[in-house]
Amino acid sequence: MVKKRVVHEPLWVKTLLFLISGAFLFVFIVLPLVTIFREAFKSGIAVYMETFSDPGVMSAIKLSLLTVLICVPINTFFGVFIAWLLTKYRFPGRKVLITIIDLPFSISPVIAGLLFIFLFGSFGWFGAWLMEYDIRIVFAVPGIVLATLFVSFPFVARELMPLMRELGKDDEEAALTLGASGFQIFWKVTLPNIKWGLLYGIILTNARALGEFGAVSVVSGFVRGVTTTMPLYIDILYGEYMFRAAFALASLMTFLALVTIIAKAVLEYYIAAQRKSMEVKIQS
Amino acid sequence: MNIEIANVNKKFGNFVALDDVSISIPKGEIIALLGPSGCGKTTILRIIAGLETPDSGVIKFFGEDFSNKKIKDRKVGFVFQHYALFRHMNVFENIAFGLRIRPRKIRPDEKTIRENVMRLVSLVQLDNFVNRFPSELSGGQRQRVALARALAVEPTVLLLDEPFGALDAKVRKELRLWLRRLHDEIPVTSIFVTHDQDEALEVSDSVVIVNKGKVEQIGSPEEVCDSPANPFVADFLSDVDELSIKKKKKGLFNVINDKRQGI
Amino acid sequence: MPLRMKKSKIPGFGLSLGLSLSYMSFLILIPISALIIYAAKISPEEYFNIITDARVISAFKVSFISAIAAAMLNFVFGFILAWILAKYDFFGKKIVDACIDLPFAIPTAVAGISLAMVFSPKGFIGSFLSLFNVSLEYSRVGIVVALVFIGLPFVVRTVQPVIEELDNSVEEAAASLGANYFQIFFKVIFPSVLPALITGAAMAFSRGLGEYGSVIFISSNMPYESEIVPLLIIKKLMQFDYVGASAIGATMLVIAFIMLFITNYLQSRMIKERS
């Protein structure tokens, strides 16, 4: 007689899987993290702090903050509208738009930067016109903002769309029959329903905007203290063999990345809880 | 006549949802739209509410053409199948929603809102639940909150989409009797959609039997049962519990008794 | 009830359509057409000459081979990690789970300098390897290391939910029919996870092909040796070879479109199979 058993891999397989995973995570996650902080603090806290008194570093931090402060609200605003459009209505071309949202993810960051060179560079479409009015876009701050907008564009819409699709249109239609206007529906009914997902999208947008390197390095022109964001400045410091300073700045960005993944995990918990309450609601 | 639907047609792609549907609904009555699922009954309800636009045909409220009227100006109360309660608002706020969002000029003051909501809350017997959130309520309680929310805007017509569809059998029976009584208390014209024959016959003043986008018969529960207009109706009502019609008459009597007992 | 709604009554269609279309045109479509139209002016022979230049070909080879190697490694390691996260509870699981997202959250440049340090002869792995006279730091293997790091979350996050949703009763049924563990795994479990695994690996490959930031610090970036395509484009730009940059750039763009098409297709098939 065959005994009924719960299917489990043999112990040696399980052990092997855990060993492989452990070794892999040690090499690819733990070691890099430890290395960043070890290199940053190798010569003591005083030297570490010195990095942040370098005017170049300070202006890089400022430029990164400025970029984030511009890009995150803009991409959030449009991301919400796009998610709303693509989940609340059906119209011809909807699938095409959904595909276009993903383009910035599938295009190499370097190509993303390249696009703006060909649009606004001296030989590009608007090049001559811009020169005439002495407006600089590429190799200047506007180019950095544009490239960052491009690469961090999809997050909000992509996080919101599955959530909004699951939520359906019932709540909005209910509000509609109760006499609510479009804006009232959005602010009082839709937004409270999607707030965790929205926050999740914003956090991812923020992380990408802050950390973007490839796209920004193409349009930056590396004018020190003017067009260097934090990741670009890490590149400069590293290239000049100023490893201590490079890793000090990198440790700041790593700290922010760790905050991001913690926030992400917390939000995932809230979103899962909300999903569960939705299921209960439909079942009963 | 309170509400009139005349020669309404509606297609979704190639699918004919409604084929030349005409229904007249007298004021104060409770009408059941009865039919198998997919027959187009929910579409009729959504067209009356304005959530769907008919391809052709006319919707009249009190003789006035409402076909192009905006949803918010139609003053319909819609109770959704899955209630669509706002999950971030408690019972009180859910019911108050329709009043709070009115433009300032016609918005009642806070005191009036409170009075109205509390009156509705006791009407649907949820006095002890005003601060609860939808997730903390049972199915039947949610259903009643949805009803109170729809009634708060003082609708000219109350539309209910499968109002008991998501409830278990026992609660369903209790609630449909209760709905019938409630309608006797506040005689607002009501239209509800159901695929359950017993439910339709027990609760409604007249039944509209719909199949494949067409109206098969309109009449009182007795009429449709005793003299079905065609084989479909006869077949569809063949396994009806004859008692449900009689029960209704008794149900009306019960209201008086129950009221005395303070239920 | 078939409610295939053509027009939704929820207000705001015009506004959201207008805003979405303008923004997406401004940010995505117009810039992409700028590059494509510029590249379209290049004559076919010239384009052919640029693309078949030995240095360009070798860059494409380096990029493709590294991305494929990294995707294959992630296929294996990503599956194992996803399996453990989905099937076992263990101490620190939440932390491990969160760590999988680190490559998404950490700036590529930071990852790049850190991996370069770990694998340099002074670093932990590098010093260990140098005992055997192996140096990863400036070899092509370094590129693969960086791409494995970058691609890991794509595989894990695609596969993990699929493993979680696996119906245990299927395994039990197979067991009750007398199958041993490996038969169950390879005949029942693995085939149902495979589509997700392929999707995840395709996404990791696509990302790896265009990756720049994390690679350039760990690779020696030698032309004909370890120079990746994105880097070659940047070098062309610096030499004001806009024609060359646009030709290679447009080629990469087309590859990205194809990869997007493939991953979308794989994903939609996955969703269909799961439902």
Image (cartoon, coloured by chain):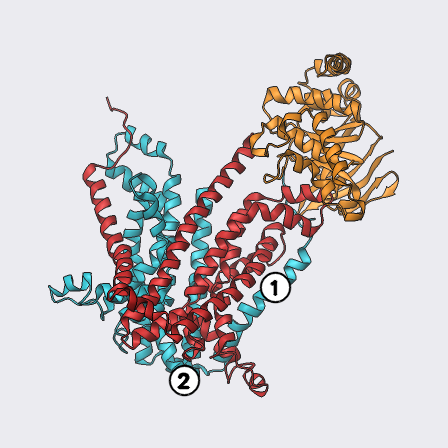
Task: Look at 33% across and 70% down and name the residue there.
Answer: A50
Placement of C151 over or under B63, stated as above or below? below
Q: Which chain is cyan?
A: C
Placement of C228 over or under C43, stated as above or below? above
Quadrant in which the N terminus of chain B is drawn: top right
Residue A257: x and y in percent read 38, 58
Can residue C144 be seen in this snapshot? no
Q: Colour of chain B?
A: orange
Instruction: Give the left or right position of residue C259, taking residue A193 as reference.
Output: left
Q: Which residue is mark 2?
A: C241
Name the foreground residue: B171 vs A230.
Answer: A230
Residue type at mark 1 is Leu
Instruction: Give the left or right position of residue A203, taking residue B63 as reference.
Output: left
Placement of B235 over or under A272, stated as above or below? above
Q: Which residue is mark 1?
A: C21
Residue B206: x and y in percent read 79, 25
Instruction: Give the left or right position of residue C71, taking residue A59 as reference.
Output: left
Task: Look at 37% across and 82% down and name the residue there.
Answer: C49
Q: Colour of chain A?
A: red
